[in-house]
Image (cartoon, rainbow, N blue to C red):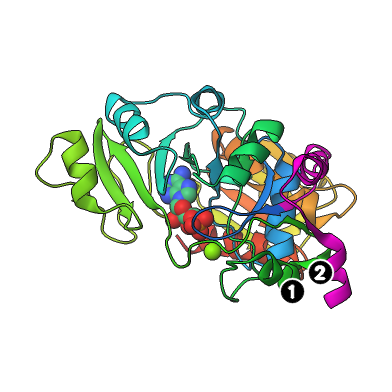
Amino acid sequence: MLKVAIMKALRPDARGLARAAAVIKRGGLAAFPTETVYGLGASAFDPAAAAGIFEAKGRPHFDPLIVHISGLRQLRSVAAEVPPAAALLARRFWPGPLTLVLKKRTSVPDIITSGLPTVAVRMPAHPVAVRLIKLTGPLAAPSANRFGALSPTTAEHVLRQLGPRGVIVIDGGPARHGIESTIVSFDRGRPVILRRGALPDAEIAAACGLRKVRLARPGARVRAPGQFRTHYAPSVPLKLIKPGAAAAPRGAAYLAFRRRPEGEFRRVEVLSQSGDLREAAANLFSALHRLEMSGAKVIYAERVPARGLGLGILDRLRRAAAR
Ligand code: AMP
Ligand code: MG
């Protein structure tokens, strides 16, 4: 494994960066240093690449991913609206460990935001991250570790965990340990802290001219329309069934894994005709949105195979069914 590590750590020079950027532009993954921890990056506009992030991490559920940008022009390509308080915080604290939750543009795929209408955006300060993102455009990136393992603060940590999965990494030296970004959302223009992090509450309050910034209770709703701290769930009841439409009534909305079912349904979505779980994961949230909008009173969803990304899809469907 050491040999793999030596072969795959890229130097943070023009050549190494160009190589990582080429992999990302082809829909692949590349890990890169940030000032918090190493991130596992994929294009923020490519749903299959984002599914690849969850697959490589072995994540049993889908968490919304933070989109990393290198400049304010890129902010406009992912966020549909930037309230004045957000613009002010961005000017004051970017680049740095502050993440802003903003209304997303439709160009950001639903798998990146777990179906939420908002996107989390951050401009990292690490010069290698900035140079990479200038080459690739916005990158969706969680920490570059396997699910449940420690967050990586060196390129070697990344290679030990993800090298065997073919993930490449740019070596930017040790990252500062244990500092996650502070996540701020906006409720009718006012900042709300969703997650405390490296940027203290008081600095955010001072920048906004407030005495205090509201802190969202974990799991609580942020009251802006359609904005939830927890994940998106369809507003229509969802029932999980075995593949094959025997149990589903006429007029229902139907989420199939591979095969279009027989019968009259209000709307049918097929996640992947070839049975590819990565493609299925990439399509999941948009498919649920379309079924929800179809006007059907209930969604019937087929169970997908319980392996790899299928576990993430099942987790999501079970939560939706439990409401
Ligand atoms: P990290 O694990 O540090 O990459 O941060 C990802 C976390 O950011 C997620 O687990 C969410 O808690 C939060 N997050 C990302 N996108 C959103 C969003 N659109 N709305 C609210 N929180 C978000
Ligand atoms: Mg993490």
Q: Is mark 1 within 8 Å of ligand 2?
A: no
Task: Kindly identify the residue that appears in the image at 75 percent across and 51 percent down.
Answer: 29
Mark 2 vs mark 1: give the one in front: 2
Q: Which residues are magenta?
A: 1-30
The answer to whether 244 is drawn above or below residue 76 in the figure is below
**Residue highlighted by disc 1:** 160
Q: Could you tell me residue 213's position as x and y percent? A: 18, 46
Labels 2 and 1: the sequence-earlier one? 2
Q: Mark 1 belongs to which amino acid?
A: Arg
Q: Could you tell me residue 81's position as x and y percent? A: 41, 24
Quarter that holds the C terminus: bottom left
Pick the residue in front: 296 or 217.
217
- Disc 1 packing (10 Å; few <14; some 14–19; many ≥20): some
Q: Mark 2 belongs to which amino acid?
A: Ala
Q: Is residue 303 visible?
A: no
Residue 5 numbered tag: 2
Per the image, is 126 magenta?
A: no
Per the image, is 21 magenta?
A: yes
Of helix, strand and loop, which one carries label 2?
helix
Task: Kindly identify the residue that appears in the image at 50 percent across and 54 percent down.
Answer: 35
